[in-house]
């Protein structure tokens, strides 16, 4: 498990893995077993809620499928990494 103060390379590897899975799912691939069809059902919604469990916190990230399709895997990983390290975008 990791915390927000874990080494950057470890957090980056986890964020990269999550981004890779999310991009694959957005393309209609099933990189993991889809018991109960939850991934297929999630693709039919406007957005998806990602959960990231860390030792010091649990993150819930809501992101639109359109944003996932338009953003590169690297961009999604950077977005997730910011949340894992504790940074937040200012609300407008």
Image: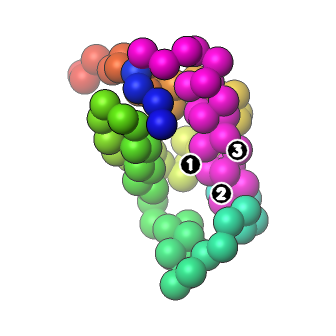
Q: Does the magenta stretch include residue 17?
A: yes
Q: Which element type, helix, strand or loop, lies under badge 1?
A: helix
How many callouts does the rendering have?
Answer: 3
Q: Nearer the viewer, mark 2 or mark 3?
A: 3
- Tag 3, which secondary structure? helix
Q: Quadrant of the C terminus?
A: top left
Circle nearer the N terminus (3, 1): 3
Which one is in front, 6 or 74? 6
Q: Position of residue 18 (x, y in %)?
A: 60, 43
Is residue 5 at all visible to an observer of this figure?
yes
Which mark is on residue 26?
2
Helix, strand or loop: magenta stretch: helix
* Residue displayed at 40% across by 44% down: 53
- Please name the residue that numbered disc 1 is placed on: 66
Residue most extreme to the bottom: 36
The stretch in magenta equals: 5-25
Mark 3 or mark 2, which is nearer the start of the sequence?
3
- Tell me where residue 15 appears, x and y as whole percent: 59, 33
Inter-mark Cα distance, 1 to 2: 9 Å
């Amino acid at each position: 498990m990791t915390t927000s103060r874990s080494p950057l390379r470890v957090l980056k590897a986890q964020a990269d893995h999550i981004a890779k899975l999310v991009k694959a799912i957005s393309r209609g691939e099933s990189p993991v077993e889809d018991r109960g069809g939850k991934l297929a059902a999630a693709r039919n919604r406007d957005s998806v809620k990602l959960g990231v469990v860390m030792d010091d916190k649990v993150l819930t990230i809501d992101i639109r499928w359109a944003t996932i399709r338009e953003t590169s895997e690297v961009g999604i990983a950077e977005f997730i990494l910011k949340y894992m390290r504790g940074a937040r975008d200012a609300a407008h």
